[in-house]
Amino acid sequence: MEYDTQIKNRVKRIEGQLRGILRMMEEQIDCKDIITQLSASRTAIDRTIGVIVSSNLIECVRMAEEKGESSDDLVKEAVNLLVKSR
């Protein structure tokens, strides 16, 4: 799978969030604020995982259909990846 600029930018934003959290820890910011930011980072990571899995699934299903193959196993694998990521 080829990762487009949009997906890469998502990861870069997450990286920035995590650096911000480290800076907050070094500045001894209240733990409630740090937890809030960690939660936001986790949500961003979960959404990025979803985007990657769905994009890959669309690509794989399209290729399977072109070959006349069943895409059932591909869908199951994508669901397993999403479940495993939680």
Image: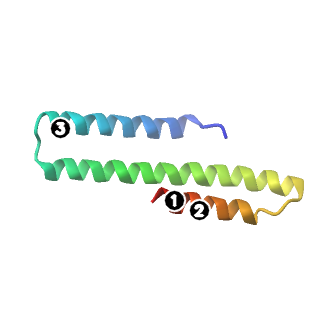
The location of residue 10, given as percent across then percent down, is 45, 40
Q: Secondary structure at mark 2?
A: helix
Crowding around mark 1 (Cα neighbors within 10 Å: few <14, some 14 to 19, many 20+) is few
- Asked if the residue under mark 1 is in contact with the one under mark 2, i.e. CB atoms within 8 Å, the reply is yes
Residue marked by disc 1: 84
When asked about the image quadrant of residue 20, the answer is top left
Task: Look at label 2 and name its amino acid.
Answer: Asn
Task: Look at label 1 and name its amino acid.
Answer: Lys
Crowding around mark 2 (Cα neighbors within 10 Å: few <14, some 14 to 19, many 20+) is few
The residue at the point 66 percent across, 65 percent down is 76
Crowding around mark 3 (Cα neighbors within 10 Å: few <14, some 14 to 19, many 20+) is some
Residue marked by disc 3: 24
Q: State the mark number for residue 80.
A: 2
The location of residue 26, given as percent across then percent down, is 15, 33
The residue at the point 48 percent across, 56 percent down is 85
Residues at marks 1 and 3, CA–CA distance in whole angstroms: 30 Å
Q: State the mark number for residue 16.
A: none
